Amino acid sequence: DSGVTQTPKHLITATGQRVTLRCSPRSGDLSVYWYQQSLDQGLQFLIHYYNGEERAKGNILERFSAQQFPDLHSELNLSSLELGDSALYFCASSPGQGLNNEQFFGPGTRLTVL
Amino acid sequence: AQSVAQPEDQVNVAEGNPLTVKCTYSVSGNPYLFWYVQYPNRGLQFLLKYITGDNLVKGSYGFEAEFNKSQTSFHLKKPSALVSDSALYFCAVRDPLNAGNNRKLIWGLGTSLAVNP
C-alpha cells in the first residue's frame, strides 16, 4: 500500500458526460501528479500540482482540468467524455516538488466511456 | 529536448537466469533516472533511482541498475529472475537543470517482462 488513495476504483459512464476523479496523497506529500494509461498510448503525464499550485503540464486535453485543494487532495475533472478517454487514471504523490523524489502511485481509477 | 527510450517492448527470460531491461536517455545536463514496476491491475511502484554518486544503484526486490554516462544508459538488471518479476517496467528521466514545465519527468513506453518457469 503506497498510502495514496483514489476514488472511485471503477467508473462507467456515457459519451458527453462529466466525471470527477479524486486523489488523496500520502500524508505530508505536497505534490500530486495525474497520469492517464491506455493500451494504445501507454503512460501519459497529465498535470502536476504542488501545494495547491500548478507546476507542470503534460498532454492534458482542454476538456480535462484539475485542482489541488488546501487539504492537499486533488481532483481531476473530465468533461465531454469521448470513447477514447476510456483508460486507467493514476494519481501519484511525492514530498516537495519532487525533482529527485520518487513518486508514490495510487491504485488508479478505471474509466469506461460507453 | 529530453527523452527516454526503452528499445524492447517485451523481454522474455527463463526463471533463474539473469535479466536486463534496457533504458537509454537524452538530456542536456546530468540526469535524474528512475525505474518503476507495474504489476497487473496495480499502480506503479518505485524500484530505484540514480541521482548522483555511485553508478551502480541497488533497489527493491533484488533489482539494480547501472548509470552509464558515456552510453547514456540506465539498464535495469537482476542476477536471477523470478516468475513473480513478470510485470511492466518503466524507465523515467528528469533533467534537473530545466526550468518550469521542462522539469517534468519523462517516461518511457514500458517494457513487458515475462519470466517463464
Image (cartoon, grey):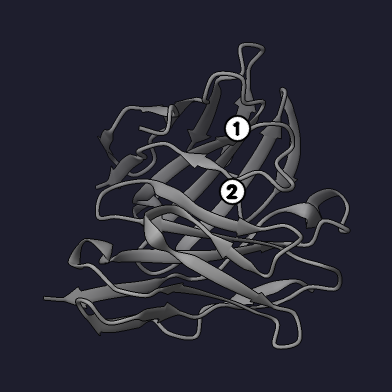
Same-chain check, marks 1 and 2: yes
Q: Secondary structure at mark 1?
A: strand
Task: Please name the amino acid that badge 2 sits on.
Answer: Leu
Q: Which mark is residue B9?
A: none
Residue occupying image coordinates x 43% and y 64%: B63
Q: Are marks 1 and 2 in contact (CB under 8 Å)?
A: yes
Mark 1 is surrounded, within 10 Å at the Cα level, by few (under 14), some (14 to 19) or many (20 or more) other residues, namely: many
- Compared with B24, A105 (above or below) is above
Q: Quadrant of residue B54?
A: bottom right
Residue occupying image coordinates x 30% and y 47%: B42
Report the front residue among A15 and B72: B72
- Compared with B5, A79 (above or below) is above
- Compared with A92, A114 (above or below) is below
Q: Which residue is mark 2?
A: A46
Residue occupying image coordinates x 29% and y 55%: B39
Q: Is residue A37 left or right of residue A69?
A: left
Q: Is residue B50 visible?
A: yes
Q: Is residue A81 visible?
A: no
State which quarter of the image contains the N terminus of chain A: top left
Instruction: Name the chain letter of the residue that bears numbered label 1.
Output: A
Mark 1–mark 2 Cα distance, whole angstroms, equals 9 Å
N-term mark: 1 or 2: 2
Q: Position of residue A99 (x, y in %)?
A: 74, 47
Mark 2 is surrounded, within 10 Å at the Cα level, by few (under 14), some (14 to 19) or many (20 or more) other residues, namely: many
Q: Position of residue A106 (x, y in %)?
A: 41, 36
Task: Please name the amino acid that badge 1 sits on.
Answer: Ala
The residue sitting at the left extreme is: B117
Report the front residue among B22 and B41: B22
Q: Which residue is mark 1?
A: A66
Q: Secondary structure at mark 2?
A: strand
